[in-house]
Amino acid sequence: MLLFPGDYNTYPLKGPKGIVKLRVPGRVSGDDLLFVRGAVVAGVGIGALPWFIASQELAAGTITRVLPEYRSAAGAAYVVYPPAKPLAPKVAAFCSYLLEHGPRIFTQP
């Protein structure tokens, strides 16, 4: 977790008018999605969360989605593994699976 008291987080968002950069001031920020979800649920403020992290809380009504017409315009997924030659079959299979199914998995339904 990283804390940035008094700093701004900038979120690139894609919406009806294209991509905008939203600057959100805050006294606490985190780089761990579970921390951010916990802070949002606790009422600390707002946070950018992927649907698969926030879906249960949204369904239960413990959090509310703001800016529903916007989606994140940033983001990447990385598979990190120790160097090995040849690449372990399980790692190769997992990478292939993510390449094929990643867009469906990581995009909100």
Image (cartoon, helix red, strand yellow):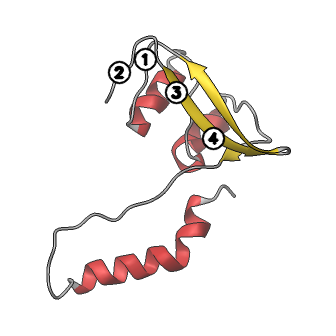
In the image, what residue type sits under mark 1?
Answer: Val
Q: Are marks 1 and 4 in contact (CB under 8 Å)?
A: no
In the image, what residue type sits under mark 3?
Answer: Asn
Seen from this angle, which residue lies furthest right? 16
Residue 4, x across and y down, in percent:
39, 19
N-terminal-most mark, 2 or 3 = 2
Nearer to us: label 1 or label 4:
4
Q: Can you tell which mark lies on residue 28?
A: 1
- Label 3 belongs to which residue? 9
**81 is higher (above) or lower (below) than 10:** below
- Based on the displayed image, in which of its 4 quarters is residue 96 positioned? bottom left
Residue 106, x across and y down, in percent:
56, 60
Q: Are marks 1 and 3 in contact (CB under 8 Å)?
A: no
Residue 57, x across and y down, in percent:
58, 35
Q: Residue at x 33, y 27 (%)?
A: 2
Crowd class of label 4 (few under 14; some 14 to 19; many from 20; radius 10 Å): some
Q: CA distance from mark 1 to mark 3?
A: 10 Å
In the image, what residue type sits under mark 4?
Answer: Pro
- Label 4 belongs to which residue? 12
- Label 2 belongs to which residue? 3
Q: Residue at x 38, y 61 (%)?
A: 78
Q: CA distance from mark 4 to mark 2?
A: 20 Å
Q: CA distance from mark 1 to mark 4?
A: 19 Å
Q: Are marks 2 and 1 in contact (CB under 8 Å)?
A: yes
Left or right placement of residue 49 versus residue 27 in this view = right
Q: CA distance from mark 2 to mark 1?
A: 5 Å
N-terminal-most mark, 2 or 1 = 2
- Based on the displayed image, in which of its 4 quarters is residue 90 positioned? bottom left
Crowd class of label 3 (few under 14; some 14 to 19; many from 20; radius 10 Å): some
